[in-house]
C-alpha cells in the first residue's frame, strides 16, 4: 500500500462509489431491458477502472477480487458467456462485496488486513464467478444473423454512431439516406440498425414527418471531427452521438427480424428511453465536462450571496429615500444581476432526483425477490431537480415508504390473481414541480390502507375517541403517529411502528408535508411536498398591527380589500364569497394573538397551497420583496405557523408565514366549525 | 396507381414513391381500406424512392398487420433495393 493513497483516500472513495453505482445501474438496466453493448461495457469499464486504481495503490485484496469479476464481464461482453438472471445477481453481490472491500480500505487507510468475514466473502464469490468463466455456454446465441468481425488497421477505428432525426427533417429538405450514403464514402458501414418502431401505422402517419433513427457501426480511418462534418448541414435536425469502440467484434442486434421480437422490444425501449432523457437537441457528445466541488465551498458562496441580498435591500431603501433617479437606476441594475447570481448559485446545488430514484431500483429488485413478489418500478420526472441537501435528507423517508409499499402494500402474485389484478404489482415514483414546491409521489396498486383497522388501532392507543367521525384524510394521517402500526406481523423490514413518525419528522424538518390517499384493494399514494428553496425566498410583505410578515410569493394568488360589504356578508363567520366560491379566512392578528385594535382598511391576501385556497386577513400590503430566511432560534421551536424570520432593509424584523402549516390550521378550524354547526356545540371557538 | 381487384389492393407504382406522392396515396388507401384484404405492392417501376417513401411502406405494412391483412412486396426496382439495403431493412419486408 502506497503512502500516496492516504492523501487522496477520500477521492478514491467517492470515485469508487460512483463507479459502483454505475455498475449497479447498468446491471439492473440489462436485467430490465435485455443485454446490450452499452450497458455491459459500462459495467466492465467500472470494474476495470476500480481494478486499475486498486493496482496503482497496491491494494492486493481488491485487485484480486475485481480481477475475477472483470474477467467474467469481459467474457460476457465478447459473448463467450451468456448473461442470465443468476449471473446478474452474482455480479450485484460482487458489487456489494467490492463496496465492503473499499470501505475496509478507507477505514484502515489501506493498512489493515482483511477480516475473516471479508476474506470468506471474497473466496466464496470468486469461486462462483469462476464457474461462469470456465463454462462455454452451449445454448443458441440469440443475436442478429449479421455479425461482422472488423479488422482493425493501425489508423482505422470502429465508431458507433447513433442518429436521432427530428420530425421536421424532411420538411427542411433533407433525407437521412444522403448522409448515410456519404458515410459509406468516408469509410465502411459494417452494420446498421434502422429503427422502425417510431413509424406509426398509416392512420397516424404524417407523410412529411420523419420517424427514423439509426445506429451505425462505421469502420474508417477518418478522425471524429471528419465524421462529425458529414452531418454539418443536418445538425439542427439531428441528435448525433459518436463513440469510438475499442477492439472487439461489433454486433448490433438486428431488431427487424420477426424471430427476434423480444430483443427488438428491448433494444428499442433502450433507445426510446435515452431519447426521453435528453430533452434538448444536443449536438455531439464527446465527454461530459464537470468538476468536483467541495459542498462546503458552495454553502459559503450561497451564504455570502444571502448576506448580499440583505445588504442590497438596505441600499435600495437608501436610494429610494434619496430620491435620486440615476442612483435608483444603477441600484436596480445591480439588484437584477444579484438576482441572477443568486439563481445560478442555487442551481449549482441542484441535483436531479432521478439519481435517488435509481437507487430504488436495487431495493425493489432485492426486496421483491426476497418476498417472492413481482413488482414493476416506474419512474417519472427523474430529471426534476432539487437542492442537494434536500435530496440527501429525503432519501431515508422515501426508502421507508417504498419498503412499506412492497412489504405491506403490494400483495403476492397469487393473492393478486385471486383479486383479479395483474400478478405483477406496480410501484410508481413521480416527481414534479408544483407551485413553488416539489412533489414526490409514491403510488402502489396494492391492497390499500384499511381505514377501519387504523381507527380501531388508534382508539386502542388512545389517539382518538370512539364514535368520532373523522375525514378519511385524517384517518390515514394517524399512521404517522409514533408507535403506530397495524401490521399483524413484524418483519425485519417494517412493522415495528418506529418508521412512519420518523418519516414525518424528517419531512417536517425540511419544511415539507406528506399527504396520504388510499382506496381499499386499489392501492395507496403517498405524496410528499417540499419547498424548492431553502435559504432565499421571494416574498410578499404585509403588516399586521406593528409586525411585518412575509408570505412566500409563489403561493400568493391575489390581494383584495376587505370591504365593509364583505364584512357585512360574513355575518361574523370566517369566510367570504369570492366571485362565487367560498374562501375561508384566517385572521392573522387573532391567530398570533396580537394586541391592538384594527385600524383603517383591512386587506385579504389570497394564498394557495396543495390545491387549497384561503385568505389571510392583514392590515397593510407592502409588495414583492426578496430576502434570506433566517431560522428562528430554538426557543421558538414549537411555534406553529412561522417558518423563519428575516431582516428588512430598514433593519426591522419580519416573520415568515409557514403557509402549509396555516393551511392545516385553517382545515382544522373549518372542520371544528362544521362539527359545531352540526352538533350545536358553541363551546368551540370560532375565528372571525 | 392503386387498384382494387377482388379485395386485393394492388399498388403498382410508376416512377415516384417519394414525399410528394404520399399524402395522396395515404388517403386513397384509407378510403378503401375496409374492402381490402391483401396488399400487393409492385415496386418494379419505381425510379424515385426516398426515406419518406420507405416510411410509407413500413407504415402501411403496420396498418395491414394490425388488421390481420397481408402485405407483400412482389417486385423491387434497383432504386428501392439500394435504399432498403442501405438501411439494412430488406428482411422486414420478406
Image: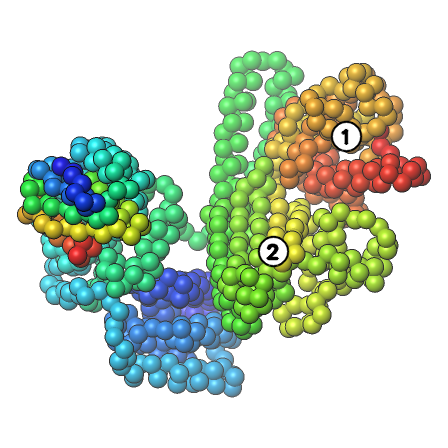
Where on the picture, by quarter, is residue B49?
top left
Where on the picture, by quarter, is residue A545?
top right
**Residue A38 position in % (x across, y down):** 31, 61
Residue, x 66% and y 51% (percent of image)? A516
Where on the picture, by quarter, is residue A601?
top right
Dot 2 lies on which element?
Answer: loop
Quarter of the image for the N terminus of chain A: give it: bottom left
- Mark 1 belongs to chain: A
On the image, numbered disc 2 is attached to which residue? A522
Determine which of the numbered discs, if any, sits on residue A585 in the image: 1
Residue, x 10% and y 45% (percent of image)? B43
Colour pattern: rainbow
Dot 1 lies on which element?
Answer: strand
Closer to the camera in the image, B91 or A290: B91
Specify whether residue A181 is in view: no
Label 1 CA crowd tier, 10 Å (few <14, some 14–19, many 20+)? many
**Residue A514 position in % (x across, y down):** 66, 49
Specify whether residue B24 is in view: yes
Q: Is residue A534 above or below residue A17?
A: above
Amino acid at each position: 500500500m502506497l503512502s500516496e493513497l492516504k492523501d487522496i483516500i477520500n477521492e478514491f472513495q467517492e470515485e469508487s462509489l460512483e463507479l459502483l453505482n454505475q455498475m449497479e445501474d447498468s446491471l439492473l438496466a440489462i436485467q430490465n431491458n435485455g443485454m446490450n453493448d452499452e450497458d455491459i461495457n459500462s459495467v466492465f469499464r467500472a470494474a476495470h477502472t476500480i481494478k486499475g486504481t486498486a493496482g496503482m495503490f497496491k491494494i492486493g485484496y481488491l485487485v484480486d477480487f475485481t480481477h475475477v469479476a472483470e474477467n467474467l464481464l469481459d467474457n460476457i461482453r465478447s459473448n463467450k458467456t451468456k448473461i442470465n438472471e443468476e449471473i446478474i445477481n452474482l455480479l450485484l453481490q460482487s458489487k456489494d462485496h467490492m463496496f465492503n472491500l473499499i470501505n475496509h480500505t478507507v477505514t484502515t487507510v489501506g493498512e489493515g488486513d482483511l477480516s475473516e468475514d471479508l476474506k470468506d466473502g471474497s473466496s466464496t464469490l470468486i469461486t462462483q464467478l469462476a464457474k461462469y468463466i470456465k463454462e462455454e455456454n452451449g445454448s443458441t446465441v440469440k443475436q442478429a444473423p449479421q455479425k461482422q468481425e472488423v479488422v482493425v488497421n493501425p489508423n482505422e477505428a470502429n465508431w458507433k454512431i447513433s442518429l436521432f432525426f427530428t420530425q421536421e427533417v424532411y420538411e427542411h429538405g433533407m433525407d437521412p439516406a444522403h448522409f448515410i450514403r456519404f458515410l459509406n464514402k468516408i469509410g465502411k458501414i459494417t452494420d446498421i440498425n434502422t429503427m422502425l418502431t417510431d413509424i406509426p401505422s398509416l392512420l397516424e402517419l404524417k407523410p412529411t414527418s420523419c420517424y427514423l433513427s439509426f445506429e451505425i457501426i462505421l469502420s474508417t480511418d477518418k478522425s471524429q471531427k471528419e465524421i462529425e462534418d458529414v452531418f454539418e448541414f443536418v445538425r439542427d435536425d439531428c441528435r448525433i452521438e459518436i463513440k469510438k469502440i475499442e477492439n472487439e467484434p461489433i454486433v448490433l442486434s438486428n431488431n427487424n427480424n420477426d424471430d427476434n421480437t423480444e430483443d427488438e422490444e428491448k433494444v428499442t425501449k433502450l433507445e426510446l428511453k435515452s431519447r426521453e432523457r435528453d430533452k434538448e437537441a444536443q449536438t455531439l457528445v464527446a465527454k461530459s465536462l464537470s468538476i468536483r466541488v467541495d459542498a462546503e465551498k458552495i454553502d459559503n458562496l450561497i451564504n455570502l450571496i444571502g448576506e448580499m441580498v440583505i445588504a442590497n435591500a438596505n441600499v435600495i431603501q437608501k436610494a429610494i429615500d434619496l430620491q435620486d433617479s440615476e442612483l435608483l437606476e444603477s441600484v436596480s441594475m445591480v439588484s437584477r444581476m444579484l438576482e441572477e447570481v443568486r439563481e445560478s448559485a442555487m442551481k449549482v446545488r441542484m441535483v436531479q432526483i432521478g439519481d435517488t430514484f435509481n437507487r430504488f431500483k436495487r431495493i425493489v429488485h432485492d426486496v421483491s425477490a426476497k418476498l417472492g413478489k413481482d413488482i414493476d418500478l416506474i419512474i417519472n420526472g427523474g430529471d426534476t431537480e432539487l437542492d442537494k441537501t434536500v435530496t440527501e435528507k429525503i432519501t431515508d423517508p422515501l426508502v421507508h415508504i417504498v419498503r412499506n409499499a412492497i412489504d405491506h402494500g403490494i400483495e403476492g402474485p397469487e393473492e393478486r390473481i385471486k383479486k383479479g389484478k395483474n400478478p405483477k404489482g406496480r410501484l410508481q415514483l413521480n416527481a414534479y414541480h408544483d407551485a413553488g414546491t416539489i412533489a414526490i409521489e409514491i403510488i402502489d396498486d396494492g391492497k390499500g390502507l384499511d381505514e377501519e383497522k387504523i381507527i380501531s388501532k388508534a382508539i386502542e392507543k388512545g389517539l382518538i375517541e370512539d364514535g368520532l367521525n373523522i375525514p378519511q384524510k385524517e384517518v390515514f394521517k394517524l399512521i404517522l403517529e409514533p408507535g403506530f402500526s397495524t401490521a399483524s406481523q413484524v418483519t425485519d423490514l417494517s412493522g415495528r411502528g418506529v418508521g412512519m413518525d420518523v418519516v414525518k419528522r424528517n419531512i417536517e424538518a425540511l419544511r415539507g408535508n406528506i399527504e396520504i390517499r388510499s382506496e381499499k384493494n386499489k392501492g395507496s399514494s403517498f405524496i410528499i411536498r417540499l419547498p424548492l428553496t431553502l435559504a432565499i425566498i421571494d416574498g410578499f410583505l404585509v403588516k399586521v398591527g406593528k409586525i411585518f410578515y412575509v408570505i412566500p410569493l409563489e403561493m400568493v394568488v391575489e390581494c383584495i380589500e376587505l370591504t365593509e360589504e364583505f364584512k357585512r356578508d360574513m355575518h361574523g363567520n370566517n369566510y367570504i364569497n369570492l366571485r362565487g366560491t367560498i374562501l375561508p379566512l384566517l385572521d392573522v392578528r387573532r391567530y398570533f394573538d396580537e394586541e391592538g385594535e384594527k385600524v383603517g382598511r383591512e386587506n385579504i391576501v389570497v394564498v394557495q397551497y396543495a390545491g387549497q385556497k384561503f385568505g389571510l386577513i392583514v392590515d397593510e400590503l407592502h409588495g414583492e420583496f426578496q430576502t434570506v430566511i433566517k431560522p428562528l432560534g430554538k426557543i421558538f421551536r414549537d411555534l406553529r405557523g412561522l417558518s423563519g424570520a428575516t431582516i428588512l432593509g430598514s433593519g426591522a424584523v419580519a416573520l415568515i408565514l409557514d403557509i402549509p402549516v396555516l393551511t392545516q390550521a385553517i382545515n382544522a378550524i373549518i372542520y371544528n366549525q362544521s362539527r359545531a354547526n352540526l352538533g350545536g356545540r358553541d363551546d368551540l371557538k370560532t375565528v372571525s | 396507381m392503386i387498384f382494387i381487384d377482388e379485395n386485393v389492393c394492388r399498388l403498382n407504382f410508376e416512377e415516384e414513391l417519394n414525399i410528394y406522392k404520399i399524402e395522396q396515396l395515404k388517403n386513397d388507401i384509407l378510403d378503401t381500406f375496409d374492402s381490402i384484404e391483401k396488399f400487393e405492392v409492385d415496386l418494379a417501376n419505381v425510379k424515385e424512392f426516398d426515406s419518406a417513401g420507405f416510411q410509407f411502406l413500413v407504415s402501411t405494412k403496420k396498418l395491414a398487420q394490425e388488421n390481420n391483412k397481408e402485405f407483400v412486396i412482389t417486385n423491387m426496382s434497383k432504386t428501392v433495393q439500394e435504399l432498403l439495403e442501405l438501411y439494412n431493412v430488406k428482411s422486414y419486408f420478406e
